[in-house]
């Protein structure tokens, strides 16, 4: 059996769920006295700000405490661990979703599902370093799922197919966002044009053209067009439209 301090123990699981759903649960009766100087929301917001600025590797309880100007032990009054804080941060970020307009066509609503996922990841790249498996569901992520289902409802898909369509669109958006984040990070060090100005001529001299006739021809064409190793934004527009058209064709 796991110990009570284990994140997977029933006690800790209950605590994290209570924190996630804290605004939906009835307020617990408390003793009178001065209000605490911090709130769970403030701690979560500080964690998000830190991760956005410095990356998830720098996310520690001590670092969040420094952001808020308090001692590290004070944070544990509001969240039991760094892992619990991360769960709360993920759900808080999901609350930033904007509604998908109901007056859009079903095709455009499905595209919007993927666009919102990608937008979130580009705004908060640290999310790409969090395992998507067994994430604890809070109100914002459940609301997102409800909104995604609402957006694609009416496409003629079964319940299972609706879930799979959302999963496929999410996976595609996530993979594309990963490439876009990598491209942005590389561009901060040296521009794509400068990088290719060095590597392009070298590759052209070294690569045997007769062994790679198609790769050489297509690679040269897209390199000239993109002026970069790849085009994440253009690939997203093309890919998500192709995915949605395929999903709708099978409906």
Image (cartoon, helix red, strand yellow):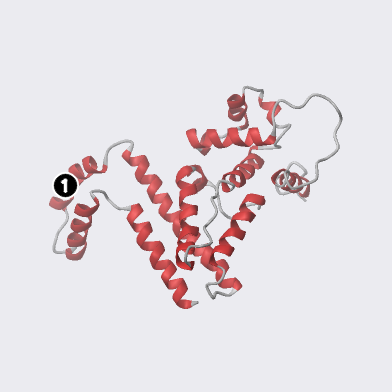
Q: Quadrant of residue 68?
A: top right
Q: Name the residue under label 1.
A: 202
Residue in the picture at 47% in, 66% down: 105
Q: Locate residue 170, reporting x and y percent.
A: 50, 59
Looking at this view, is 125 or 112 the one in front?
112
**Vertical arrangement, residue 221 with respect to residue 62, above or below:** below
Q: Quadrant of residue 190?
A: top left
Using a 10 Å C-alpha cutoff, classify the residue at mark 1 as few (fewer than 14 neighbours), some (14 to 19) or many (20 or more): few
Residue in the picture at 76% in, 48% down: 14
In the image, 111: left or right of 34?
A: left
Q: Is mark 1 on a helix, strand or loop?
A: helix
In the image, 161: left or right of 202?
A: right
In the image, 125: left or right of 132?
A: left
Viewer can see residue 138: no
Looking at this view, is 196 or 236 the one in front?
236
Q: Residue furthest front?
A: 103
Q: Locate residue 232, reporting x and y percent.
A: 35, 53
Residue in the picture at 35% in, 45% down: 183
Looking at this view, is 132 or 117 the one in front?
117
Q: Locate residue 150, reporting x and y percent.
A: 58, 64
Labels in figure, total: 1
**Vertical arrangement, residue 127 with respect to residue 72, above or below:** below
Residue in the picture at 67% in, 51% down: 139
Viewer can see residue 180: yes
């Amino acid at each position: 059996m796991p110990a009570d301090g284990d994140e997977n123990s029933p006690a800790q699981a209950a605590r994290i769920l209570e924190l996630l759903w804290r605004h939906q649960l009835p307020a617990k009766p408390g003793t009178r006295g001065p209000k605490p100087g911090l709130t769970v929301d403030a701690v979560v917001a500080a964690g998000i700000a830190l991760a956005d600025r410095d990356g998830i590797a720098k996310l520690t309880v001590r670092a969040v405490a420094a952001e808020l100007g308090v001692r590290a032990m004070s944070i544990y009054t509001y969240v039991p661990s760094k892992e619990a804080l991360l769960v709360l941060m993920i759900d808080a970020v999901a609350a930033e979703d904007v509604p998908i307009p109901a007056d859009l066509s079903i095709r455009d609503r499905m595209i919007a599902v993927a666009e919102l996922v990608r937008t979130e990841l580009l705004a908060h790249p640290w999310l790409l370093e969090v395992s998507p498996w067994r994430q604890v569901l809070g109100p914002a992520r459940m609301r997102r799922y409800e909104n995604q289902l609402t957006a694609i409802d009416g496409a003629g898909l079964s319940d299972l197919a609706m879930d799979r369509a959302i999963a496929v669109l999410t996976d595609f958006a996530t993979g594309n966002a990963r490439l876009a984040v990598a491209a942005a990070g590389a561009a901060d060090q040296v521009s794509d044009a400068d990088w290719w100005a060095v590597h392009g001529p070298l590759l052209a001299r070294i690569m045997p053209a007769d062994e790679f006739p198609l790769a050489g021809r297509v690679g040269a064409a897209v390199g000239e067009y993109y002026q970069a190793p790849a085009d994440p934004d253009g690939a997203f527009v093309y890919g998500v439209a192709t995915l949605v058209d395929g999903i709708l064709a099978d409906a």
